[in-house]
Amino acid sequence: MAADDSSEQAPSYIDYETFLDPDFSPTAFANSLVIATNNPSDTPIDLSTPLSRVLFDIQEIDTHIHTLTTKSAIPLLTHTKKQATAGERIVSEVEAQVASLQDGYERLHKEVIQRHEEADQVRIAVERLWETVKIGRAVGRCLTMGRQLETQMAEVSGSAGAAPAKKEDHRAMVRASNTLMSIRQLLSASGSGEEGEHLSKVDLITYLQNSVVGPSESSLRNRAQQIIREFSMSSLAPSSNAPTTYAQSEETKSRTTSAVLTLQLLNPQLLLAALQAYLRTSLTSSLASITRALDNLSTLDRTLLEVAARCQSIVAIESLLDATKPPQTPSLDSQRVKEQPRNLLEPLLAALDTSSLPSFFWRSLAEGLAPRVSNLMGRGGVSARALRTQKDKVRDSVRDCVLRGSQGPGGSKIASGWEREAAVMVGSVIGSLGR
């Protein structure tokens, strides 16, 4: 056995290290054989010799492999048999485990996955039913508020139900505005997960908006603007709109307060626009009437009385706005409540950049009157001479107009210090008479 091992381990003339080198190159090896068996100067190259060596080396290696496999056949077959037996045993064990896993998977699929799929379908159905319930509740709430709004609008116009026509209830304007605010808030909550998310897709809600909400809002806005436009509280020159008794005065104040709150609820800018339009109308009418009266002094006293009456109404509406706080709505958070003005007069004064409405009225009137008086005096004639002749009377009349108009209705003065406004008005008229 030792002799066999020594013979097996005897060195071979084949350089196995060259063939086993990782960097072995067949082309480089072939080139080295050709160069070793030929003279570089020979023109015909002899390839038979290197080819024979290569074939001999291959035959030698083949013989060596055959010898090794022949001598080691029994150990190789024994080892192969052991490996095959071990593989078969492993495969049988693995197949049993796989079968057990397969049975477990099928049991879990039946008990867990199938039940989960069924439960997931139930969950989807419940979620859709819940969404449907939420939409139904939102639609029902919106329709309830729509019916409430229709009832309130009937109260505003005095035609509620089938009963005989009732007196219109101006307080219903505020209630209807609050209802409109609630409907608007519900419809605007259209974000994901919010109450009004899908209301815009409901035809009934679209019909409600077009046939009830929109017309009601327009009617409330027009009615409130009309009340403010026709507001009059003076006792100097009573008009068809001015109250004549205490009860009528309180009713006028209450109706105007309702109109103011209505516009504030609908849109604060609507209220500012309505009040500014009221002041512009008073200024325009007063400016035109005083200009005509200065051209015909016989009507001056009556005209100044009407102007003072308009200013008294402005004093009254200023007092009313000062006593009216902004309405509280559910949509206002605590931060926005803190930022609200103390009353409804402050935003108007800020928009007009003035400290009081009577002061704004007189100074704006004086600003527009001065060029008209200058134009009147520039034309000359009887009117100009009459103005110069009765300058003192005109001065006293204008000053008295300012002082009387700056008092509240009934002569109760609500503020002092109107001499500056009187001086500004007198200056706008008399300033051009001495030229």
Image (cartoon, helix red, strand yellow):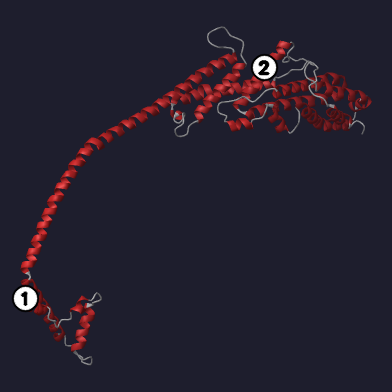
Q: Nearer the viewer, residue 160 or 316?
A: 316
Number of the label disc, if any, that sits on residue 142: none
Q: Earlier in the sequence, mark 1 or mark 2?
A: 1
Q: Answer whether residue 214 is visible to the viewer in this image.
A: no
Query: What's the residue type where badge 1 is placed?
Result: Met
Q: Picture quarter containing residue 57?
A: bottom left
Q: Is residue 129 left or right of residue 170?
A: left
Query: What's the residue type where badge 2 is placed?
Result: Ser
Residue 428 place in picture, x, y as percent: 85, 31
Pointer 1: what residue?
A: 1
Number of the label disc, if any, that sits on residue 254: 2
Q: Residue at x 50, y 18 (%)?
A: 147
Q: Is residue 46 left or right of residue 421?
A: left
Q: Residue at x 67, y 23 (%)?
A: 324
Residue 81 place in picture, x, y as percent: 8, 61
Q: Residue at x 61, y 30 (%)?
A: 337
Q: Nearer the viewer, residue 312 or 186?
A: 186
| Quarter that holds the N terminus | bottom left
Please state which of the two labelled residues, at mark 1 or mark 2, is closer to the viewer: 1
Q: Nearer the viewer, residue 157 or 340?
A: 340
Tally of marks: 2
Q: Picture quarter containing residue 384?
A: top right
Q: Answer whether residue 399 is visible to the viewer in this image.
A: yes
Q: Is residue 302 left or right of residue 66?
A: right
Relative to residue 166, is residue 43 depicted above or below? below
Q: Secondary structure at mark 1?
A: loop
Relative to residue 47, is residue 393 depicted above or below? above
